[in-house]
Image (cartoon, helix red, strand yellow):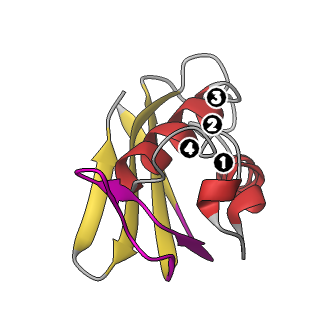
């Protein structure tokens, strides 16, 4: 089994609802780590090109950069928690991966030592 990981950071705001109470909107430097895995390498000895995964991650997070995540689909209808952001990123990138490559996990850090990980 081979694994490859990509990390990117972006700045955005959000406010989640916890137990019926809405937080004040606040900003984070979100750190995202995507780990993909697969059993076989291609003819060039690659699981998948790092640049391909970087481009896919950039495309998925681009709508959030500098924005209120809660105002961006799909988070206009769901709580913009780190857990659900990680799930959204994983689901979107999964659609773009080559055959034989799958998401192992996506981790989203919203504050130091506060990491949410989604494993499909």
For marks 3 and 4, the one nearer the N-term is 3
Alpha carbon distance from label 1 to label 3: 15 Å
Q: Which residue is mark 4?
A: 89
* Residue 92 rendering spot, x and y as whole percentages: 63, 34
Residue 15: in magenta span: yes
Q: Is the residue under label 2 in contact with that under label 4 (CB below 8 Å)?
A: yes
Q: Which residue is mark 1?
A: 53
Alpha carbon distance from label 2 to label 1: 8 Å
**Residue 35 in sight in this render:** no
**Residue 49 in sight in this render:** yes
Alpha carbon distance from label 3 to label 2: 19 Å
Q: Which residue is mark 2?
A: 93
* Residue 28 rendering spot, x and y as whole percentages: 49, 80
Name the residue nearer the viewer: 88 or 1: 88
Image height of 56 relative to 64, above or below: above
Task: Read off the magenta span.
Answer: 7-27
Image height of 47 relative to 17, above or below: above
* Residue located at (28% from left, 64% from top): 115
Q: Is the residue under label 1 in contact with that under label 2 (CB below 8 Å)?
A: yes
Q: Residue furthest front?
A: 20
**Is the N terminus in the top left, top right, bottom left or bottom right quadrant?**
top left
Alpha carbon distance from label 1 to label 4: 12 Å
**Image position of 117 (left or right of 40):** left
Task: Specify the principal SS of the magenta part.
Answer: strand
* Residue located at (67% from left, 24% from top): 95
**Is the C terminus in the top left, top right, bottom left or bottom right quadrant?**
top left
Q: Which residue is mark 3?
A: 42
Mark 3 packing: few (<14 Cα in 10 Å), some, or many (20+)?
Answer: few
């Amino acid at each position: 089994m081979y694994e490859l990981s990509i990390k990117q950071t972006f700045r955005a705001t959000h406010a989640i609802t916890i137990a019926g109470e809405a937080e004040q909107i606040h900003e984070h430097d979100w750190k995202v780590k995507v780990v993909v895995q697969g059993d076989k390498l291609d003819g060039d000895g690659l699981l998948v090109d790092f640049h391909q995964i970087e481009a896919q991650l950039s495309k998925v997070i681009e709508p959030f950069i500098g924005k209120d995540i809660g105002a961006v689909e799909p988070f206009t209808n769901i709580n913009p928690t780190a857990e659900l952001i990680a799930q959204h990123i994983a689901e979107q990138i999964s659609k773009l991966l080559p055959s034989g490559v799958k998401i192992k996990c996506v981790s989203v850090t919203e504050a130091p030592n506060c990491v949410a990980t989604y494993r499909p």
